[in-house]
Amino acid sequence: MSFRNTWIADVLRAAGLPVVEEAGWKSAGRAEIRGPFQGVILHHTAGPAAPKGGETPSLNVIKNGRPGLNGPLSQCYLSRKGVWHVVAAGRTNHAGPGKFDGLTDGNDDFIGAEMENAGDGKDPWPDVQLRSAVKGTAALLHYLKQPARRAIGHKEWATPHGRKIDPSFEMEPFRVEVGAAIAALGG
Ligand SMILES: [Zn+2]
């Protein structure tokens, strides 16, 4: 059975977030998803730092992939200004090997959200981007009827531990805010 997640843009927009639907997103990504997504994995793009890199320097890579890894590389892409670009409704290559809560197929079980940031600990995370990340993640989880616990960092998913460092901010305070945002959406 195919679970094409053509609801993503509407759910983000209903949460009051700025959304750009990338051309062809509803048919982008592979079809073989076994069931509804179980959570969201947050990433940073490790693209060029602001301001040189501008607003969306990694968007094309997320849409089209890179040598050795076919795109799309996530369902969602978040710009520095907090704009959610919806890239794919199907399965994407974002998670790699890992595990969480007994789940072991990250690309099958989790929406990938790639956030533009160099990930070097120096490139700042603008407030507008972080607020949008919290709100959007909460909206996706609320739709999926999953708790804030299922907002995890790639660094928490990936095995062996230490294989990934993204995102470069701490996940536990992020989850607390996501939990509050889910509650504000009514559960
Ligand atoms: Zn990642």
Image: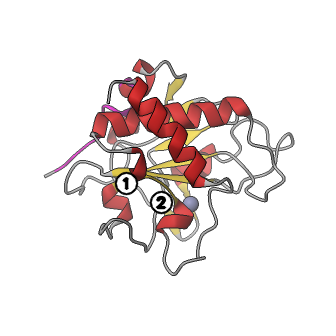
- Is residue 81 shown to the viewer in this render? no
Q: Tell how many labels.
A: 2
Task: Kindly indicate the quadrant of the structure image that contains residue 9.
Answer: top left
Q: Nearer the viewer, residue 45 or 140?
A: 140
In this view, 100 is above or below 2: below
Verify CB contact (< 8 Å) between mark 1 and mark 2.
Answer: yes
The secondary structure making up most of the magenta span is loop
Q: Where residue 150 sits in the image (x, y, percent)?
A: 39, 52
Q: Quadrant of the C terminus?
A: top left
In front: 68, or 187? 187
Which residue position is annotated with label 1? 110
Residue under the point 36% across and 50% down: 39
Quadrant hosting ligand 1:
bottom right
Mark found first going from the N terminus, 1 or 2: 2
Say which element carries label 2. Answer: loop
Span shown in magenta = 2-10
The reply to whether the magenta stretch includes residue 175 is no
Q: Residues within 10 Å of mark 2 (few under 14, many from 20)?
A: many
Taking depth in this image into account, of 67 and 8 the one nearest to the observer is: 8
Q: Which mark is residue 94?
A: 2
Q: Which residue is painted at 37% across and 60% down in the image?
A: 107
Provide the secondary structure element on which disc 1 rests.
strand
Amino acid carrying mark 2 in the image: His
> Does mark 2 have its CB less than 8 Å from ligand 1?
yes
Q: Does residue 69 show up?
A: yes
Residue at 71% x, 44% y: name it: 57
Q: Crowdedness of circle 1 by 10 Å Cα count: few (<14), some, many (20+)?
A: many
x then y, percent, for residue 38? 30, 52
* Residue 178 pos. (x, y %): 49, 38
